Amino acid sequence: HYQPDATVWTIAPGDVPFDRLAVDTPRAGLLGLAGDVHDVPEGWVALATPADSEEYARVLYAALRQADAMGLPVVVAVLPSDEGIGVAVCDRLRRAAASR
């Protein structure tokens, strides 16, 4: 799997308000389903907001590489549903987060 230079934090949808995270992390990338990503804090970059888990799987590595190219120190990834292809997306994100 691709291991980004950025530290990856995984969160469940609705677990942590992005504005509260932004206080501690003024510059970060945000990755998550379109319905879960809204009100992106100032200084953060929406790396990808896929419509569903299948699209999430297709854009995941490109979004992580984009974060590296931008020199982002942190990527906050909102986990998709843990069913179907979402299982693989969650697994890849958790591996990326655990490697740090």
Image (spheres, grey):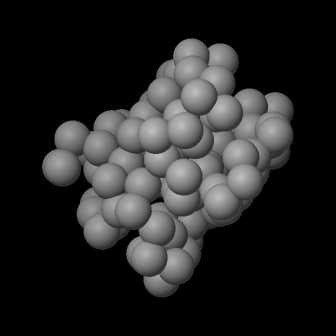
- Give the residue at the far front of this rendering: 23
Q: Quadrant of the N terminus?
A: bottom left
Q: Give the camera-side residue of 97 and 91.
A: 97
Q: What is the residue that sits farthest to the left in this orientation?
A: 99
Q: Residue at x 81, y 32 (%)?
A: 35
Q: Identify the residue at the far top of this view.
A: 15
- 21 or 100, which lies in front? 21
The picture places residue 38, in percent across and down from the top left corner, at 81, 38
Q: In which quarter of the image is residue 68?
A: bottom left
Q: How many marks?
A: 0
Q: x, y percentage for residue 2? A: 32, 65
Is residue 56 visible from the viewing direction of this image?
yes
Report the side of 3 relative to 9 (left or right).
left
Q: In which quarter of the image is residue 37?
A: top right
Left or right: residue 65 compared with residue 18:
left
Q: Is residue 14 above or below residue 48?
A: above
Q: Is residue 43 left or right of residue 97?
A: right
- Residue placed at 42% from the left, 55% from the top? 74
Is 29 on the left-hand or right-hand side of 35?
A: left
Above or below: residue 94 compared with residue 100: above
* Horizontal and vertical percent position of residue 75: 47, 53
Name the residue rendered at 56%, 66% in the picture: 63
Q: Depth check: 40 or 63 in front?
A: 40
Q: Which residue is drawn at 59% across and 28% down?
A: 20
* Residue 55 appears in view: no
Give how far across and how far down residue 29 sits, in percent: 56, 57
99 to 59, vertically: above or below = above
